[in-house]
Image (spheres, rainbow, N blue to C red):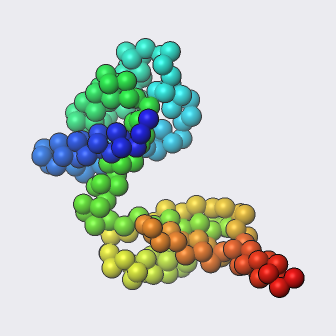
Amino acid sequence: MSTRAASRYAKAVYAGAKESATEELVYGDMKSIAETLSGSKELRNVLDSPQIKSEDKRSSLHAIFSGVSELTTSLLDIIVDNSRAGLLEKVAIAYVQIYNEDHGIVTATVTTAVEMDAAMEEKIMAKIKEITGSEKVILEHKIDSDILGGFILRVGDMQYDASISNQLERIHKEFSKRI
C-alpha cells in the first residue's frame, strides 16, 4: 500500500482538524497511534490481514484508541471501511510531519553509541537551532553501539556522520586505494 494514499488521508485529516481548530489534539492522537503501531507487530499484522473482518479491526482500534478525538475516530472508521487499515501507521506519521512543517517544528535524530548526558544534548540542540534557524526542535535519540562512538545527526535531508565507525571506514577505504 502506498505512502501516497497515506499522505492523502493525512492531508484530509489535517484540513479537517484545522477547520475545527483541533489540529493539536489530533496531533497528540496521531503521535500516540504511530507509537502504538510501531511498538506492536501483532497489531500491525491484524490491520494488514485480509482474513480478519473489518468489524473486528474497527472494534479493536476503537478499544485501543478509545480516548481519541472525534475526528481521529472518524479516520479509524474510514480507513477500515476503505480496506486501508494497514496504512494507519503511515497516515499517523504523515499527519505528524504535516503538523510539524505547518508549525515550523524541526525534527532531528541523533544516534550515539551510548546514552547522552544533558550537556551533550544541550550542545546538539543549540547546533540544530543554529543550522535550521528554528527555535522549535524535537530531538529524537537512538542508541546504536555499532557506531562505536561519536554521533550521527540527521536533520531533514541533511546527515552529519561523526561516528568512529564512519571514520574507520574512511581510513580503510584510503588504505585500500593505496595498496
Q: Is residue 29 left or right of residue 21?
A: right
* Rendering coords of residue 172 (x, y %): 79, 77
- The number of discs equals 0
The quarter of the image holding the C terminus is bottom right
Residue drawn at the location 51% of the way across and 42% of the way down = 38
Residue drawn at the location 72% of the way across and 63% of the way down = 146
Name above or below for residue 20 compared with residue 159: above
Q: Residue furthest right?
A: 179
Residue drawn at the location 63% of the way across and 61% of the way down = 143
Corner quadrant of residue 29: top left
Whether residue 166 can be seen here: yes
Name above or below for residue 32 compared with residue 174: above
The quarter of the image holding the N terminus is top left
Corner quadrant of residue 107: bottom left
Q: Is residue 132 left or right of residue 124?
A: left
Q: Is residue 161 left or right of residue 168?
A: left
Q: Residue furthest left?
A: 19
* Rendering coords of residue 54 (x, y %): 39, 17
Whether residue 30 can be seen here: no
* Rendering coords of residue 88 (x, y %): 39, 36
Residue drawn at the location 29% of the way across and 42% of the way down = 8
Q: Residue furthest bottom?
A: 178
* Rendering coords of residue 178 (x, y %): 83, 85
